[in-house]
Image: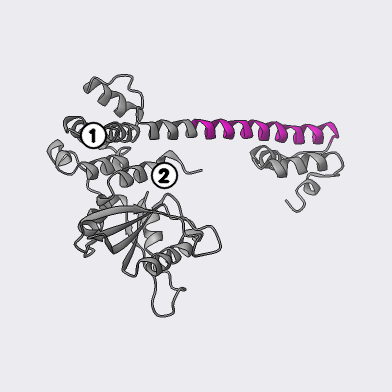
Amino acid sequence: MPTREHEAPLLLLREHPELVAELLRDLLGVAVPAHTEARIEQADFTQVFPAAFRADLVMTLRQGGRPVMGIVGEIQRGEDPDKRASWPLYNAALHAQLRCQIVLVVLAETEAIARWARKPIETVQVGSPFTPLVIGPSDIPVVTSEDQARATLELAILSALVHGKTQRGLEVGRSAARATVSLALPEPRRTLYLDLVLSALHAGDRAILEFEMDLTGYKFKSETYKRLMAEDIAEATEKGIEKGQATGQAKAVVAVLEARQIQVPDDARDRILACSDLAVLERWVRRAVTVASVDELFRDA
């Protein structure tokens, strides 16, 4: 299940897809063609490839209704070899459909992930490596001016999402939040943007900003963000239940071994208690009843 941290930038980009073109032009120096519309498209490529390939975001820039550039956007929060195998497929599928320029751009959560994502993919075509375009945290401006935030609001919101938990998080969040409430934005865009900014800050900075803006005790209001919060809570609850089950199973393994007077060295005890894989723990519980040593317990583990 995608996390709230993964979905937050996508909510912003889907609300204002023109921001993607602006990032390509202003941060990466891409020659973006003249266009009159930036349109979100279907991100599912299963109609082209047999396996389930789904990009985070697919959009087109259109001039007079005709696509002049296709853009595949990916939010990357970790190193994933499967993603690097999929990225060229996304571009190929979109090119086959649109027959125009195609760009894949990756928004990386950290500089380390950005360096990983920028590596050319050499195996797709010998002599013609596929190189993703990547935007790392250092590429996103730190927007602390309220005037600048009002002039480039969506960039200011993105700045808060990227830099909100840094030392300048309060400054970035303040400029983005104040710009959001000062502009005559339509609903539900206004509430979504405010939700995104406040959720991006550390708890202490958020409390300060809420006090400054008379928002103390602010509750998330946009339906989309409330849904993501509910999904986060459900996922955390499920993980908590699984962790409790794993802890109980691990303690049962140790208890059975000790009841049978089988020596359990500290390193083995630590390994058993640290295991969170319920299938492995269930196998160990059954084995603990018959094994003659801890080494036998870990056989084929």
SS type, badge 2:
helix
Q: Position of residue 147 (x, y in %)?
A: 12, 38
Cα distance, mark 1 to mark 2? 25 Å
**What colouring does the structure picture have?**
one colour
Quadrant in which residue 220 is drawn: top left
Question: Residue 234: within the magenta?
Answer: yes
Nearest-to-viewer mark from 1 and 2: 1
- Give the camera-side residue of 159 and 229: 229
Q: Position of residue 53 (x, y in %)?
A: 50, 58
Q: Is residue 202 above or below residue 93?
A: above
- Give the camera-side residue of 34 and 198: 34
Residue name at image x 27 percent, y 32 percent = 187
Main SS of residues in magenta: helix
Residue name at image x 28 percent, y 50 percent = 17
Q: Position of residue 185 (x, y in %)?
A: 21, 34
SS type, badge 1:
loop
Magenta segment: 233-261
Of pointers 1 and 2, the one earlier in the residue sequence: 2
Q: Position of residue 250 (x, y in %)?
A: 71, 35
Q: Is residue 175 left or right of residue 247?
A: left
Quadrant in which residue 227 is drawn: top left
Residue bearing mark 2? 6
